[in-house]
Amino acid sequence: SETVWRQANKYHVPRLAFVNKMDRPGADFFRVVQMMIDRLKANPVPIAIPVGAEEHFTGVVDLIKMRAILWDDATQGMTFSYAPVPDDLVETARLWREKMVSAAAEASDELMDKYLETGELDEAEIVAGLRQRTVKGEIQAVLCGSAFKNKGVQRMLDAVVELMPSPLDIPAIQGVDEKGQPAERHPGDDEPFSALAFKLMTDPYVGQLTFIRVYSGTLKKGDAVWNPVKGKKERIGRIVLMQANDRHEVDELHAGDIAACVGLKDVTTGDTLCDPDAVITLERMEFPEPVISLAIEPKTKADQEKMGIALQRLAAEDPSFRLHTDEESGQTIVSGMGELHLEIIVDRMKREFGVEANIGRPQVTYRETIRKTVKEVEGKFVRQSGGKGQYGHVVLTLEPLAPGSGFVFEDATKGGVVPREYIPSVEKGLREAMGTGVLAGYPVVDIKATLTFGSYHDVDSSEMAFRMAAIFGFKEGARRADPVILEPVMQVEVETPEEYAGNIMGDLSSRRGMVQGMEERFGSQIIRADVPLAEMFGYSTSLRSMSQGRATYSMEFHHYAEAPRNVAEAIIASRAKG
């Protein structure tokens, strides 16, 4: 929830919340509402509260209508009825309704004036006020239910229609045109077509489905569209609306529609599709770099070809999953966001593609960086022994950048000491050099390289010579700039009965973990800690042993941090052995 909330905040996405599994032991709707305030810094406004809880959960009180909605267990929640609010909930419902109406009244002066005069708003005014504030992102309506049993789902869908913005309520989508200048598209059918491909899925019957969200214009079956990311034209085969696993074929899409297209060959997740005569490239999705890798090989020769096809399709569907062939060993290396991620990939290969594979021991994807600035770093590439030679000479300054900054290149030369045509070759050489660090050969990150001086030869200088000079200069500078190993640190959350909490916290500390906090939730202890990924291999087995199978955990990548000296030395020694 926290990850999704951060993304919604980043992109200013209006939202509502649905508290699920109200029929489970320990379910506490009002505690969740308070946690939204404490943990998410949200402004939740319940518009429905539960009738009963755990095994006694039977329905919800709709605070707008002030009626109870009760579901029929015999029909798996497919039928429901309205009833008066239960006597034991009347006072609770009244208090929460007052809070809801007060929140709605703050949407405008007119609503607030009426609320102050009469102490009440009618249904239409409540909905209008809540919608206005939801669209602005000021509040988040909260509902509850049990999705598995279809309880509360219908009311939630009604709330989506009533409170969430239509495409016309949100600002124009931003992008860049062919010249790299800012451009935008408004959500109207009369605008040029633009859409974003946000998901790929392989269907056993129709092949690859490309899910798109149309931001402007219309799209018809058979239309030719332009992919500015790939620089290729595509033709739309069929268009299908997806409802779970059901497909409904349509001939046309309009602004705001979400659907899947059949027949797109070179589109990947995050690509833009647009009108060939009105090109725009929308903002691409950001995918984190993988933090764990392992070698994978087919069990039989028959699996060899199938494995290649399966991995390519899975990589196309999931941009956070990467694969490459190790040049030294010839092994296929797959990389992902954690052990579970790669386990799911291997399982999907077996289930969906019938491929049996052997996997190696997971390997952590480390990084390297520098800790101090070095100036006047020279890089020279000179080959002058008869005939046409090679000459490239650069002088660099290398500086460490803040985590996550990547690579920045600046040309600060003056007077043409390095001709303009060779500057791109210098940058290319620097980027190439960053692919293998000086400590253990891991990729180098978060560095600024400034070209300050250099020299050239009228005859012997070339793009290749300056590229090589930049590589040599970077390697020399990195060695002098206090290089360090960075290791991926995971955000781990363990849910455990209280009697095992002490042992689990001690175990996390022994894994070089930093416990960030502990709280009680539904009778269990929640332990949050930052732990290096290298220390988390096999944690599932250890946790089961420590808790007699009663504790569970989840983890996600959090950040890269400098590895302690003894750990870095072990990593370097391991790489040296090969």
Image (tube, rainbow, N blue to C red):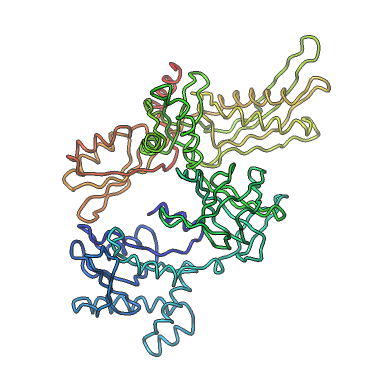
Image position of 119 (left or right of 82): right
Residue depicted at 67% across the width and 43% down the height: 231
Q: Is residue 22 above or below residue 545?
A: below
Residue depicted at 22% across the width and 68% down the height: 58
Residue depicted at 41% across the width and 25% down the height: 298
Percent across and percent down for residue 388 are 80, 15
Image quadrant holding the N terminus, namely bottom left
Quarter of image, res 57: bottom left
> Is residue 178 in view?
yes
Percent across and percent down for residue 203 are 46, 45
Percent across and percent down for residue 310 are 46, 34
Image quadrant holding the C terminus, namely top left
Percent across and percent down for residue 258 are 51, 58
Quarter of image, res 220: bottom right
Q: Is residue 309 above or below residue 299?
A: below
Choose between 28 and 483: the one closer to the eye: 28
